[in-house]
Amino acid sequence: LLVEPAAGGHGAVKEAALPFNRFPTVDTVLGPEMRSTGEVMGLDATFELAFVKAKLASGPTLPASGNVFISVRAEDKPRIAPLAAQLHAMGFSILTSAGTGTFLAERGIACTPLPKIASAVRPNVLDMLADGAIKLIINTPTRTGWNSDEGRIRSGAVRYGVPIITTTTGASACVRAIAALRNTSWNVSASQDYRAMLAAGDNTTGNAISAGAAVAPGVQTLPHRTSPASAR
């Protein structure tokens, strides 16, 4: 997943489109019974921008600013701490569960813990999702099911169109992609032209989403790149 493209080459990221939005009260943890409703692929000279393009096509899109909610299991906390620090350095505000917040605060990372949903203390993460105040969720599951707090958070992310990342590897890729989205301009080429660009040794022009992939609504509103179009 995180291997850099060879010099003069390009990176490709394929992402499955999963129909979670059709089942708003179902926990979104993946299982062997899940089937995708399609796939999209992003191509670019760097892995980070290829990842951005795959997310643009599959949706929801990655944010360039705002609040990030982080809640991870104990064994993932050491890996998530440097990613939280990078997000904070980029200007994101870090919201957390109580346990993750304590771990990050002990390492000097500014964050704001939110109350458990079951505690009935407001506002909680679901309230902030409903208000549009959370732009990204990083949650590695410890429990599954609609009756758990985290299951309700994951389902809420789907309901309100907020991107959710459920592995530390995915979180690392996401943070790298956000940094590229904020700091790098990119443009679009049709996929059938990409072989010619590679043959000419030109890897400076970014490729569009692969042929046949639908561009997610709202793509044109994201900053720091020219307006993309589907590649045909």
Image: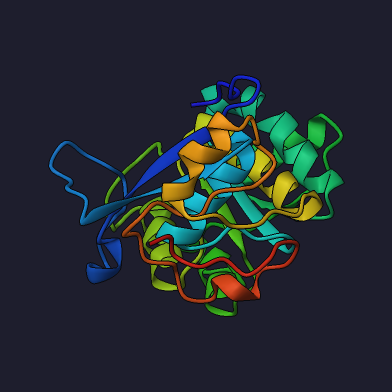
Side of 210 where 101 appears, left or right? right
Residue 150 in picture, x, y percent from top left: 42, 51
Foreground of the two, 197 or 160: 197
Q: Residue at x 29, y 57 (%)?
A: 147
Residue 105: quarter of image: top right
Is residue 73 at least partly visible in the picture? no
Q: Position of residue 145 (x, y in %)?
A: 27, 51
Q: Is residue 154 left or right of residue 134?
A: left
The C terminus lies in quadrant: bottom left
Q: Is residue 162 above or below residue 200?
A: below
Q: Is residue 33 visible?
A: yes
Image coordinates for residue 74, horizontal then vertical, percent:
54, 27
| Residue ranking furthest to the left | 33
Residue 94 shown left or right of residue 96 in the figure:
right
Specify the farthest residue to the bottom.
Answer: 131
Q: Residue at x 22, y 67 (%)?
A: 23
